[in-house]
Image: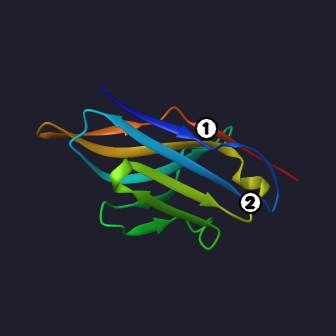
Amino acid sequence: QVQLVESGGGLVQAGGSLRLSCAASGSIFSIGVMRWYRQAPGRQRELVAGISSGGSTNYADSVKGRFTISRDNAKNTVYLQMNSLKTEDTAVYYCFATGQVATRWYNYWGQGTQVTVSS
């Protein structure tokens, strides 16, 4: 069984910062790409940022220059540093990862962590 456990969400004022963490645990041989998605009420889930196993990153235009994704491969953990937060960043943030179990690759999702940015 593989689990992604997120932490670090909460309530912050506009202009503030939060750091999300997502740790993968279980019988994983290898972790591939890791991503953060978010879903605001009434909206579709959208990609926020991604990072490959080699460290290549990509970001949604709406968060470029404010958010930074990073990972610690030794800990199977991905982070999302969120600075200069805006009210429109309010959403449930989900961690996603591809993981190799035995000889196959699977997709995994975390349970989500709420981020609320107040004005």
| Residue that sits furthest to the bottom in the current view | 65
Q: Residue at x 40, y 56 (%)?
A: 72
| Residue annotated with mark 1 | 113
Q: Quadrant of the N terminus?
A: top left
Give the left or right position of residue 113, taking residue 78 as reference: right
Q: Circle 2 sits in a helix, a strand or a loop, which is it?
A: loop
Q: Residue 77: image x %, image y %?
A: 42, 49
Calculate the distance from the C-alpha at mark 2 to the C-alpha at mark 1: 16 Å
Q: Residue at x 51, y 32 (%)?
A: 111
Give the left or right position of residue 4, taking residue 40 as reference: left
Q: Residue at x 74, y 54 (%)?
A: 88
Local crowd size for mark 2, using a 10 Å CA cut-off: few (<14), some (14–19), many (≥20): many
Image vertical order of residue 46 relative to residue 59, above or below: above
Residue 44 sits in which quadrant? top right
| Residue that sits furthest to the front in the current view | 74
**Amino acid at circle 2:** Leu
**Amino acid at circle 1:** Thr
Residue 82 sits in which quadrant? bottom right
| Residue that sits furthest to the right in the current view | 119
Residue in front for this viewpoint, 66 or 78 = 78
Q: Residue at x 59, y 71 (%)?
A: 64
Q: Residue 36: image x %, image y %?
A: 50, 51
| Residue annotated with mark 2 | 85
Q: Are marks 2 and 1 in contact (CB under 8 Å)?
A: no
Give the left or right position of residue 27, taking residue 116 as reference: left
N-term-proximal mark, 2 vs 1: 2
Q: Residue 80: image x %, image y %?
A: 55, 56
Residue in front for this viewpoint, 54 or 63 = 54
Image vertical order of residue 65 relative to residue 16, above or below: below
